[in-house]
Amino acid sequence: MKFLKCQKGFVTAFVAVLLPLFLLFGALGMDYGRAFILKHQLQSACDAASLAGASAVSAKLMTDPMGVVVGEKLILDPAIAEVRATEVWNQNVTSLKLIEKGVTIVDTSNHAAIDGDSDGYIDSYKWGVTAKIDSIIAGPLTGVGNEIPVTRVAISKVQE
């Protein structure tokens, strides 16, 4: 009975059992935190690329059936938008060092000049990316392997 009531060494046993759990949850939090930050950096790079694409505008004069100018409409030049968006995307990927941080860019073909308000004029630019973020703990625990899949899309509309 005396042995069962003795509490010497309880803290040591308690720490020995809980310390690995605390370390696991700490590492898991750091891994998810890193993935969270990289997802947001990918989103900001997509935002910048779509804004750069949407900046390739020119004014088109609107006329009535009599040929009188009644206003102007800003429309996008798809070729210039593509060049500008690609340049900004590449600059952001390089400056943010996404590749060095463990981001694998899988697909960047989800981009195009589009008619955002369905009025017959190209007035928006969309840039999307699919990537994978290296993960040591979070990926294997969630069953997606050693990489967390990420898809980010940004659409910028020309404002008049």
Image (spheres, helix red, strand yellow):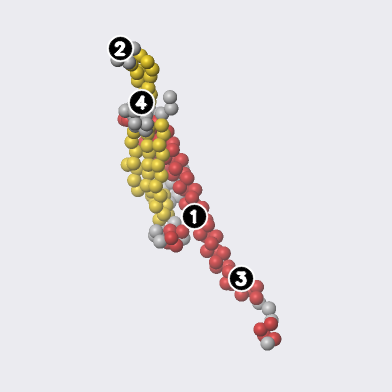
In the picture of the structure, the residue carrying the numbered disc 2 is 66
Q: Quadrant of residue 80?
A: top left
Please say whether residue 83 is visible from this viewpoint: no
Instruction: Identify which residue, 115 or 113, lies in the foreground.
Output: 115
The image quadrant where one finds the C terminus is top left
Please say whether residue 43 is visible from this viewpoint: yes
Query: Is tag 2's residue or tag 1's residue first in the polypeptide sequence?
Result: 1
Q: Quadrant of residue 75?
A: top left
Residue 75's disc number: 4
- How many residues crowd mark 2 within 10 Å: few (<14), some (14–19), many (20+)? few
Query: Is tag 4's residue or tag 3's residue first in the polypeptide sequence?
Result: 3
- Of the residues shown, which amino acid type is indicated by label 4? Ile
Q: How many angstroms separate mark 2 from mark 1 (CA)? A: 62 Å
Residue 32's disc number: 1
Q: Quadrant of residue 82?
A: top left
- Of the residues shown, which amino acid type is indicated by label 2? Met
Query: Is tag 3's residue or tag 1's residue first in the polypeptide sequence?
Result: 3
Residue 15's disc number: 3
> Along the horizontal axis of the image, is 159 left or right of 14?
left
Q: How far from the left and from the top, in percent, is residue 38? A: 46, 48
Q: How many angstroms separate mark 4 from mark 3 (CA)? A: 66 Å
Q: How many angstroms separate mark 2 from mark 3 (CA)? A: 86 Å
- Of the residues shown, which amino acid type is indicated by label 1? Tyr
Q: How far from the left and from the top, in percent, is residue 116? A: 37, 33
Q: How many angstroms separate mark 4 from mark 2 (CA)? A: 22 Å
Query: Is tag 4's residue or tag 2's residue first in the polypeptide sequence?
Result: 2
Element on which disc 1 rests: helix
- How many residues crowd mark 3 within 10 Å: few (<14), some (14–19), many (20+)? few
Q: How many angstroms separate mark 4 from mark 1 (CA)? A: 41 Å
